[in-house]
Amino acid sequence: MPLATSLAIFQSCNITGVPKSTRCAILRDMVKVRKAERRPPLNKTHKLKRQDWAKKYLKTDFSKVLWTDEMRVSLDGPDGWARGWIGKGQRAPVRLRRQQGGGGVLVWAGIIKDELVGPFRVEDGVKLNSQSYCQFLEDTFFKQWYRKKSASFKKNMIFMQDNAPSHASKYSTAWLARKGIKEEKLMTWPPCSPDLNPIENLWSIIKCEIYKEGKQYTSLNSVWEAVVAAARNVDGEQIKTLTESMDGRLLSVLAKKGGYIGR
């Protein structure tokens, strides 16, 4: 019974008359309190496109795919992360409450095989549209990483990005094509599919690290420095585990007929 109340769980076992405090004490040793995950709803068309995508890339060498995405980090962190046990007699720490989480930083990164690309920081105040996104890639990804790679690497690399408007526009697609990233070198992407992108798991690792114990930040530079430090602590084996999970993800989405795979 996912997300059931303690009362509902006990009633399903035909157990009544147990106080809430006792129910919670018993369940605490067996289960965890979790919030429901927020995901875009999948309609029939979405599911069909996810299945088509999985079939198309089923025989792909995923060690050649660069998985990319942006992440926004705020000074205060996600809602609900500042929870935890405290000892008897201790006072709960005080947290600042600021509008919009105190502001934040937009971060871009990629992973390929066992390598982290970036992270790179989007300039504060810049809204990513097609033009600014392409300029950002030029100044960071292309100049600082891609240009150093061999011709054979560039020939075989597949670039993945999601369908955000700044990514999927005609302007951005044409610009990437001029960079040699076109046709089979630019991965198509199904709608509403963050669960299929392994870099989302990297973002989770980084956020867990920078916001552990309810940590908050006082400046955009300090939260950015925390992101960089956390990213540097993710070793190649962890990244390889994420990129090597793709075969399993594709098989799972086919088994679920295009439904979410729970990654």
Image (tube, helix red, strand yellow):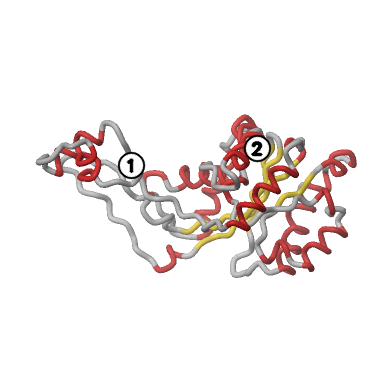
Assess whether mark 1 and mark 2 are in contact (beta carbons under 8 angstroms): no
Pick whichever, 190 or 219, lies toward us: 190
How far is the residue under mark 2 from the one under mark 1?
Answer: 29 Å
Badge 2 density bin: few <14, some 14–19, many ≥20, Cα 10 Å: many
Q: Which residue is mark 1?
A: 1
Q: Amino acid at mark 2?
A: Met
Pick whichever of labels 2 and 1 is earlier in the sequence. 1
What residue is shown at x 75% (from left), y 50% (from top)?
A: 187
Q: Classify mark 1: helix, strand or loop.
A: loop
Pick whichever, 143 or 70, lies toward us: 70
> Which labelled disc corresponds to residue 199?
none
Q: Is residue 178 left or right of residue 86?
A: right
Q: Which residue is mark 2?
A: 246
Q: Classify mark 2: helix, strand or loop.
A: helix
Badge 1 density bin: few <14, some 14–19, many ≥20, Cα 10 Å: few
* Residue 118 appears anywhere in the view: no
Q: Position of residue 188 (x, y in %)?
A: 74, 53
| Outermost residue, right side | 151
Q: Position of residue 245 (x, y in %)?
A: 62, 34
What residue is shown at x 25% (from left), y 36% (from top)?
A: 28
Asked if 126 appears above or below 19 in the picture, the reply is: below
Q: Amino acid at mark 1?
A: Met
Q: Position of residue 155 (x, y in %)?
A: 87, 43
Q: Is residue 194 left or right of residue 6?
A: right
Q: Is residue 164 left or right of residue 174?
A: left
**Location of the N terminus (image quadrant):** top left
* Residue 161 appears anywhere in the view: yes
